[in-house]
Amino acid sequence: MGSGGWWRLCDYLQDPWKVARFQRLCGVEAAYFPSSSSSEAQPNGAVSSEAQQQDAGPRHRNKDCQANGTAHPPDCKKKPQRRNSLTGEVGQEFIIRNRFLYFLFCLATELGNELFYISFFPLCIWNVDPVVGRKVIVIWVWVMYLGQCTKDLIRWPRPPSPPVVKLEVFYNTEYGMPSTHAMSGTAIPISILLLTYGRWQYPFTYGLLLAIIWCSLVCLSRVYMGMHSVLDVIAGFLYAILILIVFHPALEIIDHFNLTYKYAPLIIISLHLALGIFSFTLDTWSTSRGDTAQILGSGAGIACGSNFNYMLGLMVDPTPEQLPFIPPSITVTLIGKAMLKFVIGVVVLLMLRAAMKKISIPLACKVFGIPCDDIRKARQRMEVELPYRYITYGFVGFGAMVIVPYLLTLIGLH
């Protein structure tokens, strides 16, 4: 295929009408309501958003129309998920005609959001396998960092609305190429499979099937939400595979350095901070800059915590003779203990996060002479957003690796 053929293929996969058709196929429609201004005179040639929705794109006969007078199937009006407190964007209402797919893809898209990360990674560290947990986090940090920086370098916009219906507006200020949700949704399950197979006894087929389902749901959810084109998702998937090919062979070297080198914390903190400063210079403000600093801070905190545990002998890795692990029998006692550890740990992390947020934002404003009466505006400055996110989530990562396990040991749960 020549260069012209590749560009035509890219244009074909970038077409927002393919996203809109997939949304309609899944039962998502825009909800338009007459406004008070609709009766006002408009300039000659002005087209309403409803008309744009109907007239744009290729025309075709709608075979799914119902007979005149037939009642529509039950539907549900919704507002976009996760309003962005920094931009104030709330988005338009939409109609859901298939609630099962709506809740399925909402759950799937959460697999790439902060709530999942702050729950899943600690759960893995405290209850399953801290070695696998910290190695997956290394992969996650590099995948997300490279993905966010690539977005700011390519600067391709997200699918326009209309024709696409935006079910989510939190990340709407970011660029779309590649999809970092697709990248993390590909890298995390595959890296877990690669790191656990042979270390834990389980059928490879089950692990592979889980990874495929996880990856597929996350990738499809980004098109369903109207946040990415098909091309964005495919590029994110392939980009994540490429990063895994490069970084997975070096994972043992990186992990050994983080654990054993005396000055590793100083190098880790400096490197992650430098990467954060570089990413903040790529483009104007968007939520991706804060997310990048947050990811780098979390990764630095986890790595420094791992070094702290190793140097003090607080968390000893199993010897090769102890492997492979046999998954324990699922009992009420096991589930109850795991949930208790998880709840206690998450409460501690949320308290630590709230305390550091309360301290770091005013401190950064004071140090750099930025007025802090309008927190939303102040956080759009690199001098505030970078140290706030980096310090706050650095402490959260350190707490997940050191403070919470030590606390659980004191109360006899670790």
Image (cartoon, helix red, strand yellow):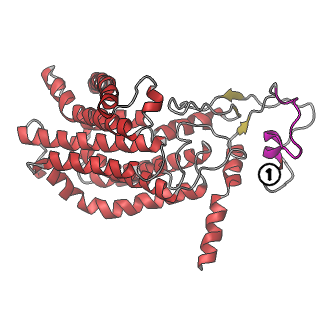
Q: Is residue 232 left or right of residue 291?
A: right
**At which x and y percent is residue 109?**
51, 40
Q: Is residue 18 left or right of residue 412?
A: right
Give the residue displayed 46% in from the left and 61% down from the top. Answer: 238
Q: Is residue 228 above or below residue 113?
A: below
Label 1 secondary element: loop
Quadrant including the C terminus: top left
Q: Residue furthest bottom?
A: 2
Q: Is residue 196 left or right of residue 20?
A: left
Characterize the magenta stretch by its predominant secondary structure: loop
Residue 329 at least partly seen: no
Under mark 1, the amino acid is Ala
**At which x and y percent is residue 64?**
82, 44
Q: Which range of residues does the magenta coloring cover?
A: 37-54
Taking depth in this image into account, of 112 and 211 the one nearest to the observer is 112
Please name the residue that numbered disc 1 is placed on: 56
Quadrant including the N terminus: bottom right
**Quadrant in which residue 327 is drawn:** top left
Taking depth in this image into account, of 176 and 414 the one nearest to the observer is 176
